[in-house]
Amino acid sequence: MSERCDNRSVGVIMTDETGRILLINRAKPPYGWAPPAGHIDDHGGSLDTAIAEVSEETGLGLSGEDMRLVMEGYRIHGQCRRGGEYHDWDVWTTPLPSGEPVAKPDEVRGILVADTFALHALAQQTPYATYERPGLEPAWATLLSELGHL
């Protein structure tokens, strides 16, 4: 991982057969619930980063075959803990793979497969979020809304 922000981020929306979305509760800033995501850094490209971040944060394996790029280069302004002032986001979707997700303790405090009701409740909590009671991670409140999930 690079120490400086590369301003390029990738996230993966994984849905089960009922449309619920897998979210992780971030253990590092920016705190909050979000789909697995991270900086492109040295991963290579967007798809490689998406696959790597899902594996790193949930222990789930993706092949890339069922992945679909649904948003590319969507700019969101906001301070990054690694020095950036914005991120250009690529967002992928894929079916939730079989297997039990396992939180990586230094990156993830919990895992939730959220239905529409839970997503909306977390989005409403976002402006009032605390470490103890997080809402959606702010960038993801925007991304999920733009993609029609909120």
Image (spheres, helix red, strand yellow):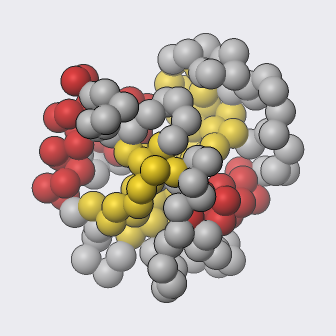
Q: 64 above or below 43?
A: below
Q: Residue placed at 19% from the left, 54% from the top?
A: 118
**Residue 3 image point, x, y percent:** 81, 27
Residue beneath the point at 28% across and 28% down? 129
Q: Residue furthest bottom?
A: 98
**86 or 26: nearer the viewer:** 26
| Residue 68 visible in the snapshot | no
User: Could you say which is closer to the camera, residue 118 or residue 16?
Assistant: 118
Q: Is residue 13 left or right of residue 51?
A: left
**From the viewer's perspective, is 54 left or right of 19?**
right
Relative depth, front residue between 39 and 26: 26
Q: Find residue 146 and report its horizontal and vertical position in percent.
A: 34, 40
Q: Position of residue 50 (x, y in %)?
A: 65, 57
In the rendered view of the protein, which quadrant contains the N terminus? Answer: top right
Taking the spot 38% from the left edge, 45% from the top edge, the residue there is: 33
Q: Is residue 2 above or below residue 94?
A: above
121 to 50, vertically: above or below: above
The answer to whether residue 2 shows anywhere in this view is yes
- Image height of 54 relative to 7, above or below: below
Residue 106 drawn at (x, y percent): 61, 48
How many tags in the picture? Answer: 0
